[in-house]
Each structure stands twice: as structure tokens, then as C-alpha cells.
Amino acid sequence: MKPIIVVHHHEIGLKGKNRGYFEKHLLRNVRLTLKGLLPQNAVTGGFGRFIIYIDPNQEVTNEVIGRLKKVFGLSNICFGFETGQSIEEFNSIAESLLIEKSFSTICVKTSRANKAYPKTSVEVNKEVGAFLCSRFNVRANLSQPDETIYIEIVDKLAYVYLSKIPGAGGLPAGVSGRVVSLISAGFDSPVASYKIMKRGAYVVYVHFHSYPFVSHNSIDQVKKILELLTQYQYFSKLYLVPFAECQQDIVLKTPQPLRVILYRRMMVRVAERIATNEKANALVTGESLGQVASQTLRNIRVINNAAKLPILRPLVGSDKEEIIDVARKIETYDICKEPYDDCCSFLTPRNPETWADPAEIAEAEAQFDVNDWIEKLLVKTEKVEFKFPSSYT
């Protein structure tokens, strides 16, 4: 009887002939997230599940489970034991898992990957369930039990565990290619980055700031946000672009209502150049349709026209309450609620345009040297790197 954690795969089970590619990435990510806690060979298996062997003498189980909950591609996380295939062994382990629990109904669910096993899943459920009902003086309830014992019968072995902790779901980090996210210290763009990571994209971050004309707060807060988000993809790059001088030039040379759109178009161009250098295939923003003046359909279209790469907007149909709910879930909320000086609010016009005319935008941009500013901003850009866990190489 060996203590284990069973982690089941999420949607990669539907990938057909490409399944091996996704499982390879997921196995790498599981081993990587547990680096420093468990040896690499503690994680084994494939085809629907991984088995993680735990040293019973080490108090690492809670930390291991905490890290596994942030691995994209996992459906659930289950603590239990590896054992032989006798009913007596199933009974013994189920009893040990339930001994300190308080419950009045029980259910046993068995699956047989090994179809040569002499008993059917239903027969195992009945025998183990009868033992548990008698041992703990409880009733069977197959629809809404207080506790559920799971038994997985595989080749020569079985895994017995209690309950399933929900995993992060989605696709393994890194399987969908690379994107560049325009990130601020607000609620929206960190959530957008999280959502696109959940679809398997590796995210490179670009933050536009107005320091030293405003405080350093936005930079510090973005760094704290990335320390959290890097737990999902293990290594992150952050490009810090000083944007204030470019904004001042736009203010001096262009009509006031168009400024925010012109800021956004310049940001998109600079981010696209960084994306090209990073071999990324798309940009990502935290825009939500109609949330602010620059996010009307017409303005989104005008901003899009500044880029050749697609601009992904994972939050386009989300309201603020939905976004904040995710921010709380991923623990960025407390950072993002703190005040900061956003570069788009620096030199913001009183009456921003909500329905921009592409011809007016083109005329306004002709008043300053777009390409020259792109080069100036890239030269002054700084790069910061983050890694998780700290032993990552």
C-alpha cells in the first residue's frame, strides 16, 4: 500500500491521434510544478491519468496539491493509495480514508481499465459498499452521497481514493503557441492573460507605463501580478515600455478626442514588434465590449487596423462582475484593487471619441512620426524575467 496522488487529464482525452503530444507536455508541466518538492521519477503514467508517489515521511502533501491545482490540463486531483486488486485491500484502504470523516451516506464508484479483472465494476461497488455501510453504520446513496470512494483497477494494480479536488482544466501550458499580452495593473488584462493561458498559450507580457512622470506603482503591481500568473506557465517575460514622452507628442500634435485611440494604436504597434521578435502569433488585450470609450465596436475596429497580427480579446463578452470573480479566484484581486497611475489615464482627454472615423485617425497620425516613435520606445524598453518554482531552470 503506497500513498499516491492521482491526477486525471482534462480535455486532452479528446485529442485523438495528437493525444500523445498533449500528454507529453502535461507530464512535463506536472513534473516542473513539483520541482523542489518531489523527484522527477515520482510522477509516472499517462493515457488519462498520472500517478504521483508521495513519501509518507514527508509533510509535503498540501503543498503538492496546492501546486497541482494550478496546472492547466488537469481535471481533478485525488489523494489515496496504490494497492493490490483484492476486495479485502479495497475495504482496508477505504476504511482508513474514512475513519476520521463524519458522514451518513456513502457511494463506491469503480472503473476497470483492466477488463480481465474477474469482477465487474458493479460487483466491486456492491461488495465494498456493503462493507463500509456495515463498518460505519451508514446508508448507500448513489446520487448525492456525503462521501464517495473511488476505485480504479488497472493492470495488476488498483488505486483507491476519496473525493476529487477540482483541477484547473483547460489545455497544458505551451501547447497552443505564443502570444503577447498588453498587461496593466487593472483587473481586466491579468484575467484575460489567465484565460488565454488556460487555452494552452504561452504568454509574453508588455506593460506600458508613464514613469517617471507618474509613480512607479503600476510597474510594481504588474510585477506582483506576474509572480502569481507565472505559477501557471513556469517562466514569464515582461517588457516594460516607457510611454509618457510618446503620449506628450500625441497630445501636442493631435485632436483631443482621438488621443486614447492613438495611444492604443501605438501600443499595439510596439507590442506587435515585440511579438515578432518573440515569434508570437497573436496579441491579447483585456478589452470588454463597451466597457470604456475606447472599447466600442468602431474603436476596436480602428485599433485593430494598426496591427497585422490578430488581437485576441478573451473578455470581450464579460461584464465587470464576471471579471472580478475570476480575479478573486486567481488571487490578483487584492493587487489590482490598489490605486495606481495607468498610462492611458495619464493625459486622458475629457471627451474621448466613442465612434472614431478611420480617415480622421489617419490624418491625426500623419502629424507625428509613427515609425520613429516605435523605434525610440523599443530602444528604451526593459525586460524582466520571472520563474516558478524558484528551482526552475
Image (cartoon, rainbow, N blue to C red):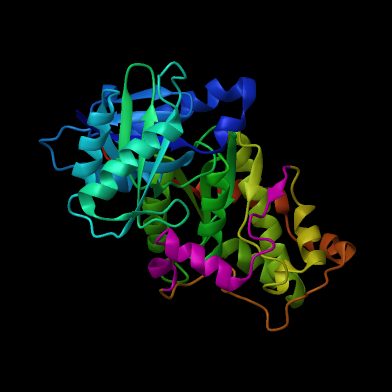
Judging depth in this view, the residue of 172 and 252 nearest the camera is 172
Residue 298 appears at what percent x and percent y?
Answer: 82, 65
Eyeballing the image, is 259 above or below 153? below
Residue 303 appears at what percent x and percent y?
Answer: 75, 58
Residue 121 is left or right of residue 292, and the answer is left
Q: Which residues are magenta?
A: 309-337
Eyeballing the image, is 13 above or below 60? above
Residue 106 is left or right of residue 53, and the answer is right
In the rendered image, the residue lying farthest to the left is 57
Residue at 71% across, 69% down:
294
User: Does residue 300 appear anywhere in the picture?
Assistant: yes
Residue at 31% across, 38% down:
128
Residue 154 is a magenta residue: no
Q: Quadrant of the C terminus?
A: top left
Residue at 56% across, 31% down:
13
Res 317 → quadrant: bottom right
Judging depth in this view, the residue of 60 and 376 nearest the camera is 60
Residue 310 is a magenta residue: yes
In the rendered image, the residue lying farthest to the bottom is 350
Residue 51 appears at what percent x and percent y?
Answer: 34, 29
Residue 315 is left or right of residue 172, and the answer is right
Judging depth in this view, the residue of 145 and 306 nearest the camera is 145
User: Does residue 242 appear anywhere in the picture?
Assistant: no
Residue 157 appears at what percent x and percent y?
Answer: 32, 21
Q: Quadrant of the N terminus?
A: top left
